[in-house]
Image (cartoon, helix red, strand yellow):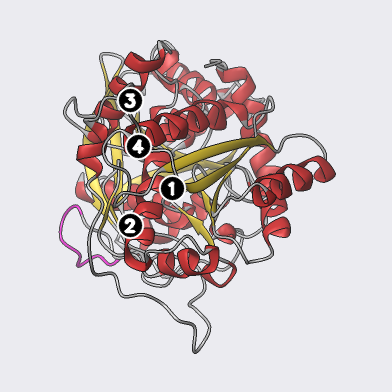
């Protein structure tokens, strides 16, 4: 597995900001302030199914993910005949490969675990990977190759631009689960298009819920106009202020480029807030942290988005104390750690730089397995409609439910960095 550094991740998230279009829209209602601690009432986005569309109730046999994670991937006689074929439309180029490289290898590893643990109700799983990086024509050709090769369902790339190319090729006839994307516009059950991560609306609202639980009443935000770097801040501000908090200022920054935050720090010093929320990349967040400390503002809490882990924040110095939103439970006994231990032992690969990305791949395969069990068919449209009605799916990151939507309700985790390691600070149920 190639490990890409934070500088490359800068380009990746800048691509996300340039290509995303669907999440810079009117904000949904804020999180309910009457929800119990640790719970937020932000629902998923995405369109409901068309009237008359057949869906399958979320009942029947359930897939045992724990049995699969405990299996020996090198068993002598794995299942192989008549498989459920999962195509991975992976962006393995310089921009998307940070996520889809380890995620696609993890998908292959999970197929081995499934086939060595009896399959999905006796049906084998095969994962086929195609690189969709390159020109739009190259992307379309790669996706069509997966479909012509018999893929019953696709896993998709983390960024919206190549993601929409995949949907142009599938034309709503084959389900696509985007393993690493938080882009709300990709979630559309009418097109059999699904997220497996929480979306940006849910993630930013969870950060506001966490701030409320910590009794942080004043905040400064740093944002950049447009999707992701602007949209996450808009959602946070709406939820935070609706719960009684006050945003003292929203200060600009340049994503991926700016490392000098002297002007922002000087303005923050005039009226220090309880916290700062920003979706900036890890290198920039760490630079901001250092400059705040030099100004004597080290008691101002820093909360970042899922960009922190995705841009390899845990490989940087001076990260202790940072909070960030992310996708998986870091506990030693968690399914994430069991999956990573199994994968690294079997392949000899190093620990992934962004562990949540491989966790989300596990979630996607769990959703597929659950959908298959409820229809007992590899017909792509039946599988896609079954995914829309999934409920209580046990994944690597927790329990997922779709409710006839393209985005799941699922746990959201807030980590704090302690001694360079992720520790669970808060858990939000959407």
Crowdedness of circle 4 by 10 Å Cα count: few (<14), some, many (20+)?
Answer: many
Q: Which residue is drawn at 61% across and 50% down?
A: 150
Q: Distance between the residues labelled 2 and 4?
A: 16 Å
Judge depth for marks 2 and 4 and give the one in front.
Answer: 4
Question: Circle 3 sits on which residue?
Answer: 73
Residue 221 versus residue 188 in the image, above or below:
above
**Mark whose residue sits in front, 2 or 1:** 2
Task: Give the SS element for disc 4.
Answer: helix
Judged from the image, the secondary structure of the residue bearing numbered disc 2 is helix
* Mark closest to the chain's N terminus, 1 or 4: 4
How packed mark 2 is, by other alpha carbons closer than 10 Å (few <14, some 14-19, many 20 or more), is many
Residue drawn at 77 percent across, 48 percent down: 140
Q: Distance of mark 2 from mark 3, alpha carbons?
A: 21 Å
Stretch of the chain drawn in magenta: 32-38
Mark 2 and mark 1: Cα distance apart in space:
46 Å
- Which residue is labeled 4 in the image? 115
Report whether 413 appears left or right of 143.
Answer: left
Left or right of 319 on screen, residue 64: left
Q: Marks 2 and 3: CB-CB under 8 Å?
A: no
Residue placed most toward the observer, 80 or 184? 80
Cα distance between the residues tagged 3 and 1: 53 Å
> Which residue in the protein does label 2 denote?
370
Q: Which residue is drawn at 31% across and 54% down?
A: 410
Report the side of 430 relative to 331 (left or right): right
Q: Distance between the residues labelled 3 and 4?
A: 8 Å
Q: Kindly report the secondary structure that dominates the magenta region of the rendered protein.
A: loop
Figure check: 75 above or below 324: above
């Amino acid at each position: 597995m190639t490990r890409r550094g934070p500088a490359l991740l800068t380009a990746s998230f800048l691509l996300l900001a340039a290509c995303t279009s669907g999440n810079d829209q009117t904000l949904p209602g804020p999180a309910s302030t009457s929800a119990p601690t640790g719970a937020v009432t932000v629902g998923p986005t995405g369109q409901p199914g068309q009237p008359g569309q057949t869906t399958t109730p979320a009942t029947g046999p359930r897939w045992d993910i724990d049995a699969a994670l405990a299996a020996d991937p090198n068993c002598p006689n794995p299942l192989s005949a008549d498989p459920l074929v999962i195509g991975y439309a992976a962006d393995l180029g310089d921009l998307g490969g940070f996520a889809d490289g380890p995620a696609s290898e993890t998908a292959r590893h999970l197929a081995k675990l499934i086939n060595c643990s009896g399959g999905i109700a006796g049906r084998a799983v095969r994962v086929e990977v195609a690189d969709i990086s390159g020109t739009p024509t190259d992307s379309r050709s790669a996706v069509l190759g997966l479909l012509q090769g018999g893929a019953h369902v696709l896993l998709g790339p983390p960024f919206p631009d190549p993601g929409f190319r995949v949907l142009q090729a599938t034309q709503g006839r084959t389900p696509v689960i985007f393993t690493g994307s938080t882009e709300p516009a990709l979630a559309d059950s009418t097109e059999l298009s699904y997220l497996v991560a929480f979306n940006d609306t849910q993630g930013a609202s969870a950060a506001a819920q966490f701030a409320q639980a910590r009794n942080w009443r004043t905040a400064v935000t740093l944002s950049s106009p447009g999707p992701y770097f602007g949209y996450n801040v808009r959602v946070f501000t709406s939820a935070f202020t609706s719960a009684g908090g006050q945003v003292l200022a929203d200060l600009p920054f340049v994503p991926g480029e700016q490392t000098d935050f002297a002007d922002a720090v000087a303005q923050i010093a005039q009226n220090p807030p309880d916290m700062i929320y920003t979706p900036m990349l890890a290198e920039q967040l760490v630079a901001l942290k250092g400059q705040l400390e030099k100004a004597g503002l080290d008691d101002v809490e820093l909360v970042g988005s899922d960009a922190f882990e995705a841009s390899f924040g845990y490989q940087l110095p001076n990260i202790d104390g940072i909070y960030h939103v992310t996708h998986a439970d870091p506990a030693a006994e968690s399914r994430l750690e069991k999956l990573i231990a199994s994968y690294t032992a079997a392949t000899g690969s190093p620990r992934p730089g962004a562990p949540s990305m491989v966790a989300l791949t596990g979630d996607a395969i769990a959703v597929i397995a659950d959908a298959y069990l409820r229809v007992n068919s590899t017909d792509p449209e039946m599988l896609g409609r079954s995914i829309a009605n999934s409920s209580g799916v046990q994944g690597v990151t927790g329990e997922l439910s779709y409710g006839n939507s393209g985005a799941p309700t699922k746990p959201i985790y807030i980590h704090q960095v302690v001694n360079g390691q992720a520790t669970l600070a808060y858990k939000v149920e959407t």
